[in-house]
């Protein structure tokens, strides 16, 4: 079956590539399994992935992001070889490509900086804020905090004028410190930030938001952070605030159709280091399920991308995902802000996709939207 290219007209595809399952950190809320395995993606696997992706009808630009493990835990020649191979294959296809790496930044040195610059790689850094917050969860395999090493990597990025974004995981602990979080980002010149929560997903089977009062504390944190950002002329830029503001401005009556990439086949395509692939959420590649065969929807050596629609695992997942979307759209007033939530959260929390509300959406959609709307109403602001 050929790819349905019409589904991609308004979205650039995201290709997640796992260079290795290994990570030099052992964050307490990580959803990824096998973080001690040091295997890495081979050139043969890369060649098949690159060729399949570049010759596919997926629209330009195609974004390729190295993730799902610590991408810098492989030798530097891994990326020199990877980009040499990718550029050679793309001589034939002439695709427009964007490149990214999501890293904990602890391994960044001057040589890595040169690789980032030479290949125009967008960098995302995982850091949870000031040292006393970051080191509570982001630790090595022997339990040591990693904040100083992460900040050393950030300094190298800044000194070399490499733009980067950050992602911070908000737990019930960090919710108590909005001022300290804000001051940390401002004092360190970090301009573009994003917030996640410690969600139930993949191998992470619990969340601090399962504790009573945590959602109330989350709203308090968001309200305070909004106030601080507003008073500072909109800096640092917060991904969640900008996304919600854009939806309010462009879809004020909630009647527009929001395309949620995690619910749409092939908007996101995740490859593990062996060449197994899945679609919908990247977290599904780290989720165990005998019913859905660990969400492997093909292997690049045996199944070209355009065969995914015939794959029985994909078919079964897609049916449930669509059913869940229908329930969400018909029952939830927040549909226009999330487009149906995250399939990985639905499955990790309930064992199914054909459900609606999850803990993640109660916190990181509903409480977030409510906090922002309350703030705007209080201030008498219009977007």
Image (cartoon, rainbow, N blue to C red):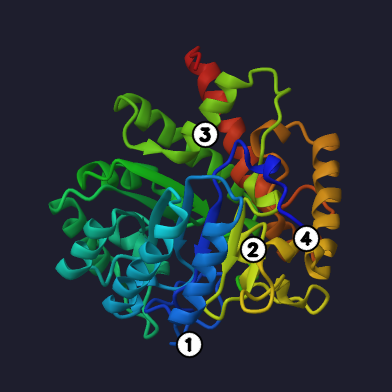
| Label 1 to label 2: alpha-carbon separation | 23 Å
Q: For mark 1, what is the residue?
A: 37
Which tag, 2 or 4, sits closer to the chain's start?
2
Q: Quadrant of the N terminus?
A: bottom right
Residue 69 lies, with reference to residue 372, above or below; the image says below
Which tag, 1 or 2, sits closer to the chain's start?
1
| Label 3 to label 1: alpha-carbon separation | 36 Å
Residue 355 lies, with reference to residue 351, above or below; the image says above
The residue lying at 50 percent from left, 12 percent from top is 380
Give the left or right position of residue 266, taking residue 26 as reference: right
| Label 1 to label 4: alpha-carbon separation | 31 Å
Q: For mark 2, what is the residue?
A: 200
Quarter of the rendering containing residue 349: bottom right
| Label 4 to label 3: alpha-carbon separation | 31 Å
The local crowd at label 4, few if under 14, some if 14 to 19, many if 20 or more residues have their Cα within 10 Å, is some
Q: Which of marks 1 and 4 is in front?
A: 4
x and y percentages locating residue 2 in the rendered image:
74, 55
Q: Does the CB distance between marks 1 and 4 fall below 8 Å? A: no
Quarter of the rendering containing residue 362: top right
Q: Nearer the viewer, residue 30 or 243?
A: 243
x and y percentages locating residue 273 in the rendered image:
52, 78
Q: Does the CB distance between marks 4 and 3 fall below 8 Å? A: no
The local crowd at label 1, few if under 14, some if 14 to 19, many if 20 or more residues have their Cα within 10 Å, is few
Quarter of the rendering containing residue 313: bottom right
Q: Does the CB distance between marks 3 and 1 fall below 8 Å? A: no
x and y percentages locating residue 383 in the rendered image:
49, 17
In the drawing, what numbered circle is on residue 309? 4
Helix, strand or loop under label 2: loop
Which tag, 4 or 3, sits closer to the chain's start?
3
């Amino acid at each position: 079956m050929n790819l349905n290219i019409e589904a991609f007209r308004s979205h650039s595809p995201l290709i997640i590539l796992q260079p290795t399952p290994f990570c030099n950190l052992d964050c307490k809320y990580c959803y990824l399994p096998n973080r001690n395995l040091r295997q890495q993606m081979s050139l043969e696997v890369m060649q098949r992935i690159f060729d399949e992706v570049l010759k596919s009808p997926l629209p330009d630009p195609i974004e390729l992001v190295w993730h799902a493990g610590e991408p810098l835990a492989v030798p530097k020649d891994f990326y020199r070889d990877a980009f040499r191979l990718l550029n050679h294959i793309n001589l034939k296809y002439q695709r427009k490509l964007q490149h990214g790496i999501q890293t904990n930044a602890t391994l960044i040195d001057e040589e890595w900086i040169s690789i980032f610059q030479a290949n125009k790689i967008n960098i995302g850094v995982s850091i949870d804020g000031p040292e006393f917050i970051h080191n509570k969860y982001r630790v090595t395999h022997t339990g040591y905090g990693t904040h100083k090493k992460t900040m050393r990597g950030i300094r190298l990025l800044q000194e070399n004028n490499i733009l980067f974004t950050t992602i911070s995981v908000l737990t019930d602990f960090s919710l108590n410190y909005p001022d300290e979080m804000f001051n940390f980002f401002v004092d360190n010149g970090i301009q573009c930030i994003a917030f996640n929560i410690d969600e139930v997903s993949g191998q992470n089977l619990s969340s601090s938001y399962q504790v009573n009062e945590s959602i109330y504390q989350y709203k308090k944190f968001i309200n305070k952070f909004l106030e601080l950002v507003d008073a500072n002329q909109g800096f640092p830029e917060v991904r969640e605030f900008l996304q919600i503001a854009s939806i309010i401005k462009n879809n004020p009556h909630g009647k527009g159709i929001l395309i949620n990439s995690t619910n749409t086949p092939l908007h996101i395509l995740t490859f593990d280091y062996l060449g197994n692939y899945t679609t919908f959420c990247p977290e599904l590649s780290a989720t165990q399920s005998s019913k859905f065969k660990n969400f492997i929807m093909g292997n690049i050596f045996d199944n070209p991308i355009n065969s995914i629609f015939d794959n029985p695992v994909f078919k079964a997942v897609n049916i449930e995902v669509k059913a869940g979307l229908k329930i969400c759209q018909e029952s939830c007033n927040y549909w226009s802000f999330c487009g149906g939530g995250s399939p990985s959260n639905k499955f990790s929390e309930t064992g199914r996709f054909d459900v609606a509300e999850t803990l993640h959406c109660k916190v990181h959609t509903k409480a977030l939207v409510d906090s922002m709307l309350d703030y705007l109403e209080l201030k008498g602001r219009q977007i």
